[in-house]
């Protein structure tokens, strides 16, 4: 069974939709409540490498795309979650699974205001100490 | 010791161009923990990119980092070409070869730059001077092809901006030939000098499991036995048409990282020679006009590791969202385990060994936590690092 | 011209500060000290502490977090101290001027004595700039 089939099998009905945009770029969405379990399966069980996570402000809500890479085939599996509540956005942190997620979650927190529950060290990474609280540069309402 | 001493490594060291702040918690001579504070270089490029046209963005992302100045625009144009169906469908063949030549030349100049810095940190200023002296012909090659020593402005969506003239190719080959004896010299210096070995072997070790958990990339990962190289895993440019090797080491220490970088220099020279021999005639640009709605990911193997760009397009002429992750973002974070357990005198070289794209390196400083008085500064810490080399040379360690 | 300024022009010791730069200008500054250009033969030296500096070379787009630290460094420099803005970002913030994390340009924060444009300025341009600076100081302006 190749990695694509294994991902589909292990994640099963957690996958809400699955799009193969090209031979090596696959995008699929899951419910944000399942992020911890899905990440553990992808990282620990199936051995994918976590590359980065992109947070963006969309009309439907705040979207985070977690990019996992399967190096032997050079394929990128991008896992999308949508957080509809823009006033108090929250999601489980995946840093307890692997330390490499620590910095990117801090960056998404300070840029978009998403709270990562269970993050061991959620404090400012890039913005200055005197940057006003509650202002999130990557949100569309923030004018630079 | 009853109180913890914090050693801040931060901003403006003469050789560390970018500011990053490492707070090392020390107990006597040993580093027990490290806190990394960055942000001194954050210029809001991702947000700025949303206000630029697609073809203005390469100029913006080129200036994320000066050393890997071609990796970021390359990853960006690959991400947009991903929306269009992939680089090989959109870009003419001659442009693929030119892209690879620029990419590999950049790798050579970056590794030589790092070699110089590493030499300085352990006290071998001669290595610094010679490495940067041999970097100059590489920059001359860049100037010949692109018009500038850094910031090449070569990449555009659908091709490259400038062509390599046929009459320049013999000169480029000759310069490459003159570079190889210099690389031999560095290889000899690193391999044969017992003091350098004593200084770098076993220092700053990152195990394979730590490398996987911290998701490190590039030579930092390959030094710990993690076999990743984007050029082989997801080939781009003309790389799949060339004969070259991925260099892997197992030890995970600074010596392994140094060896990888020097061996990669040889591989890059080989690849550029092959490109110059095989480059076909033809167009260099396919004149892409519109970017349809969609999303794309572009990845390149920068000198420091995987550089990934993710772009979302809504069909207008500006990117809706551009996410940039430079390789040093993951590699620098791994210093949390790499530097811990070592001594203060090894701290400077360990933190430099991941080759942080110094868009954020702060200096080192030592502060006594109980009194909050600075007892050492970054210059002192590099001096400590260099003194350890002297002690090893004199047999006192 | 005061003796302090006269002494300064004989052998300028420079301290380099990066205030949110991409590093290109910083590397070109360092390149001036390497064998091809070798600015040290003119007595110019790159030193580790601002307290010994005659000139501060500032690069970068004036990132919000770095500016207070840059000001502190300027205060620590013994006067007279010449401020040199190296690179387009230090001159005018270049393409980052509309960023949320970049504020005023350098010359609204510190008094700048010399501007060296370029992205990055070549080592020849930096050396030429330093030569012009020495000429300017010698003329007592």
Image (spheres, rainbow, N blue to C red):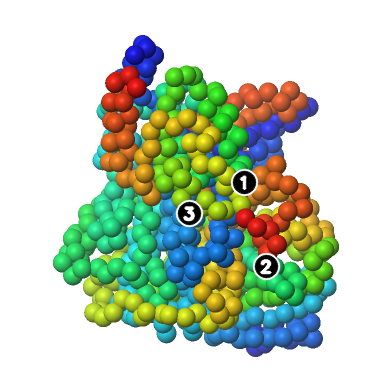
Q: Is residue A140 above or below residue C32?
A: below
- Asked if badges 2 and 1 are on one and the same chain, I answer no
Q: Which residue is mark 3?
A: C95
Instruction: Bin the neighbour count of mark 3 within 10 Å (Cα to Cα): few under 14, some 14-19, many 20 and up.
Output: some
- Residue B323 in percent (x, y) is at 59, 65
Task: Determine whether, in the image, residue A116 is placed left or right of residue B77.
Answer: right
Q: Chain of mark 2?
A: A
Label 2 belongs to which residue? A56
Helix, strand or loop under label 3: helix
- x, y (%) of residue A42? 70, 74
Depth check: give the residue in front, B319 or B181. Answer: B319
> Which quadrant of the figure contains the N terminus of chain B?
top right
Residue at the image position 30 percent from the left and 41 percent from the top: C125
Q: Residue at the location (43% across, 53% down)?
A: B67
**The quadrant where residue B27 appears:** top right
**Tag shown at residue B38:** 1
Q: Chain of mark 3?
A: C
Does any portion of residue B302 appear in the rendered image? no
Q: At x 61% / y 35%, what residue is drawn?
A: C68
Query: Residues under labels 2 and 1: Cα distance?
Result: 22 Å
Disc 1: CA contacts within 10 A as few (<14), some (14-19) or many (>=20)? many
Which quadrant of the structure image shows residue B69?
Answer: bottom left
**Along the line of sight, which residue is nearer the eye, A142 or A37?**
A142
């Amino acid at each position: 069974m190749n990695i694509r089939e294994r991902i589909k099998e292990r994640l099963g009905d957690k996958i809400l939709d699955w799009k193969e945009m090209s031979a090596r770029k696959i995008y699929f969405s899951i419910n944000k409540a399942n992020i911890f379990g899905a990440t553990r399966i992808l990282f620990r069980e199936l051995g994918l490498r976590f590359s980065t996570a992109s947070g963006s402000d969309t009309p439907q809500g705040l979207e985070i795309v977690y990019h996992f890479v399967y190096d032997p085939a050079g394929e990128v599996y991008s896992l999308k979650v949508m957080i509809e509540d823009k006033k108090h956005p929250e999601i489980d942190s995946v840093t307890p699974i692997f330390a490499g997620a620590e910095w990117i979650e801090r960056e998404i927190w300070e840029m978009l205001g998403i709270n990562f529950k269970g993050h061991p060290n959620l404090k400012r990474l890039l913005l200055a100490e005197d940057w006003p609280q509650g202002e999130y540069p990557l949100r569309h309402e923030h004018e630079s | 010791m009853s109180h913890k001493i914090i050693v801040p490594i931060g901003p403006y060291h003469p050789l560390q161009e970018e500011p990053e702040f490492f707070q090392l918690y020390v107990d006597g001579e040993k580093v027990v923990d490290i806190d990394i504070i960055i942000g001194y270089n954050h210029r809001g490029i991702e947000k700025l990119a949303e206000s630029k046209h697609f073809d203005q963005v390469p100029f913006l992302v080129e200036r994320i980092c000066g050393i890997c100045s071609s990796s970021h625009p390359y990853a960006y144009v690959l991400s947009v070409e991903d929306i269009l169906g992939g680089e090989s469908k959109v870009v003419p063949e001659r442009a693929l070869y030119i892209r690879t030549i620029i990419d590999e030349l950049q790798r050579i100049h970056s590794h030589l730059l790092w070699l110089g810095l590493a030499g300085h940190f352990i006290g071998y200023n001669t290595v610094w001077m010679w490495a940067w002296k041999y970097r100059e012909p590489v920059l001359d090659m860049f100037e010949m092809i692109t018009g500038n020593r850094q910031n090449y402005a070569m990449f555009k969506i659908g091709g490259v901006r400038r062509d390599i003239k046929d009459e320049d190719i013999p000169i480029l080959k000759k310069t490459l030939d003159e570079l190889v004896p210099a690389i031999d010299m560095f290889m000899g210096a690193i391999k044969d000098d017992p003091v350098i070995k004593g200084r770098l072997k076993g220092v700053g070790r990152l195990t394979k499991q730590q490398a996987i958990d911290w998701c490190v990339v590039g030579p930092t990962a390959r030094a710990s036995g993690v076999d990743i190289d984007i050029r082989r895993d997801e080939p781009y440019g003309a790389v799949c048409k060339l004969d070259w090797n991925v260099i892997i080491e197992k030890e995970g220490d600074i010596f392994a990282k140094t060896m990888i970088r020097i061996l990669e220099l040889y591989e890059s020279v080989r690849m550029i020679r092959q490109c110059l021999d095989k480059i076909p005639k033809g167009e260099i640009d396919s004149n892409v006009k519109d970017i349809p709605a969609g999303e794309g990911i572009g990845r390149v193997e920068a000198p420091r590791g995987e550089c990934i760009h993710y772009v979302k397009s809504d069909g207008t002429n500006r990117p809706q969202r551009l996410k940039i992750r430079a390789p040093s973002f993951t590699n620098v974070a791994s210093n949390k385990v790499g530097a811990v357990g070592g001594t203060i005198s090894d701290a400077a070289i360990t933190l430099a060994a991941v080759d942080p794209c110094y868009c954020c390196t702060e200096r080192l400083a030592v502060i006594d936590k109980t009194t909050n008085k600075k007892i050492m500064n970054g210059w002192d810490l590099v001096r400590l690092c260099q003194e350890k080399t002297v002690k090893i040379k004199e047999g006192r360690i | 011209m005061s003796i302090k300024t006269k002494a300064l022009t004989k052998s300028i010791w420079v301290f380099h500060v990066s205030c949110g730069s991409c590093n290109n200008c910083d590397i070109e500054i360092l390149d001036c000290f390497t064998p091809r250009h070798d600015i040290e033969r003119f007595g110019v030296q790159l030193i580790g502490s601002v307290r010994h500096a005659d000139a501060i070379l500032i690069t970068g787009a004036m990132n919000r977090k770095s500016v207070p630290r840059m000001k502190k460094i300027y205060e620590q420099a013994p006067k007279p101290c010449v401020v040199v803005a190296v690179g387009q970002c230090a001159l005018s913030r270049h393409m980052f001027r509309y960023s949320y994390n970049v504020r005023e340009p350098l010359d609204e924060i510190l008094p700048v004595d010399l501007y060296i444009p370029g992205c990055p300025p070549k080592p020849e341009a930096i050396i030429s700039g330093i030569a012009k600076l020495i000429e300017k100081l010698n003329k007592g302006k």
